[in-house]
Amino acid sequence: MTNAAYPDLHLWIGGRRIEAGGRTTEAVIDPATGTTLGLLPHATTGDVDAAVAAAADGFKVWRRTSAIERSALLRRTADLMRAEAGGLAALITLELGKPLPEAAREVETAAGMFDWAAEECRRSYGRIIPSRTPGHRLMALREPVGPVAAFSGWNAPAITPARKIAGALGAGCSIIIKPSEGTPAAALFIAHMLAEAGLPAGVANMLFGNPGMVADRLMEADAIRMVSFTGSIPVGKHLAALATRTMKRGVFELGGHAPVLVFPDVDVEAVARGAAAAKFRSSGQICTSPTRFFVHETIHDRFAAAFAEAASAIRVGDPFDPATQMGPVQNARRLEAIDALVEDARRNGATVMAGGARIDRPGFFYRPTVLAGVTPSCRAANEEPFGPLALVASFRDAEEAVALANRLSLGLASYVFTRDLALADRLSAEIECGNVVVNHWLVSYPETPFGGVKDSGIGLEGGSEGFQAFEQVKFVSLAPH
Ligand code: NAD
């Protein structure tokens, strides 16, 4: 896809495209070239109010639509996404900068989110509770929460909106989603698929704009009953405070700084090569990206050398080039952030084993970087890099490894590599994280629950648990008259 094929951007409210008109617009930038892809209209306060009204009306229709019909619509959306997978993958690559095959995998996973919700919504069973009074029937029924306000970041521009929209719609909720302004066309593509699949007007709405204004106005709206947020910790905490004040339910999927514990009984070089592939996927801009590598002291140097060698061999370049293994980071802010973390570590005595510099070409390119000897006082040891940066340090024994993993106030993903499954079992109980992955790198599937602990968030997405987050339980007690 070329810049010329980039679609016109718009808002989507009440089943209608809202074009820029006289609205403020924002340039969407191609991270691989730094050029402007298109102009994104910003919602006015009136647009936000119109979206709330549309979602309230949409909810009245959708909550009365049978689970079987909702399921069929979600299934059609998944089928349409697969039929149009090439176009959506190209938009992801254009806006995010990740290589095309990775973007194609994202489309398949996003379609899988719709499949999962299509299946799960047919099984939204309640319970009959044995009554202590003869003739009384006690029922716990699952109902949709109501209109949902959702916010997503730019790093998984199809998966994150898909997960939120599919879950909400499957449960019978309507939704207003504000995807990231950095990757709007990928999200709008999903909106078009929903419309084509026959979703009634107002059930799903998409806004872009000044994030603070849009979020504050949505959170103040009485009609909105739930917030589902994926993004950074400070913004997540701000929205969680607003949700508490206005008594809305919330799911908050926030940042991580994933530890990886590598024990000496593994194939060191194989794990190091796998680590490089996992770390630099999507230029490290994944909330579950493995970042803090803690390696047993007897294999530390071997692991660091093999990891650095594999990182240095990664081909960085144009994400549309089939030879490319890693593209740019998504925006100039990330480039500056990574630069600052690496410079700070360097000043504090860290060793640059691989990378450690920008790549001198247009766009936002940074070399796959591996640092050793990063002390706990370095910023990189404490702040999520959200970019192509990994840290390697050593540990003496399992106790120290767990203490290092648990040192931060973050707890999203963690990884353990050992052949000793009893040890892995013990560690998976002791590591303070929402997800522990042993001997591989895949953290999340449509059918499995995903969420963080500590500052990494509240609540779950994915799996039955994530689906039920969009439902509330109503207790009904029936007695004969
Ligand atoms: P971000 O917090 O800047 O943006 C996320 C969303 O919030 C966007 O829609 C954005 O426009 C909106 N937003 C920004 N400022 C706002 C404000 N003041 N008020 C209300 N909304 C606002 O995050 P990002 O930079 O897009 O994403 C990176 C972060 O997201 C990282 O920390 C990463 O770990 C995290 N993340 C977490 C998960 C997860 O599932 N746990 C998944 C992906 C990313």
Image (cartoon, helix red, strand yellow):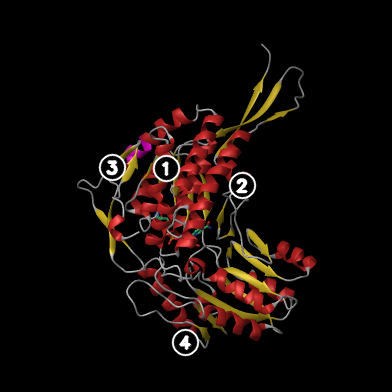
User: Which residue shows up at 30% across the image and 60% down it?
Assistant: 3
| Residue sitting nearer the eye, 406 or 371 | 371
Residue at the location (55% across, 48% down)?
Answer: 112
Residue where numbered disc 3 is placed: 18
- Residue at mark 2 to residue at mark 3: CA–CA distance: 34 Å
Vertical placement of 148 versus 414: above or below? Answer: above
Residue that carries the numbered disc 1 in the rendered image: 193
| Amino acid at dot 1 | Met
Quick one: SS at disc 4?
A: helix
Q: Nearer the viewer, mark 1 or mark 4?
A: 1
How packed is label 4: few (under 14 Cα within 10 Å), some, or many (20 or more)? few
Residue 463: which numbered mark, if any?
2
* Residue marked by disc 4: 347
Q: Secondary structure at mark 2?
A: helix
User: Which mark is nearer the camera, 1 or 2?
Assistant: 1
Of badges 1 and 3, the one in the foreground is 1
x and y percentages locating residue 275 in the rendered image: 60, 72
120 part of magenta stretch: no
Residue 216 in the image: state x and y as whole percent: 38, 48
Q: Quadrant of ligand 1?
A: bottom left
Q: Is residue 20 left or right of residue 195?
A: left
Badge 3 element: strand
Spatial separation of the CA atoms under disc 1 and disc 4: 50 Å
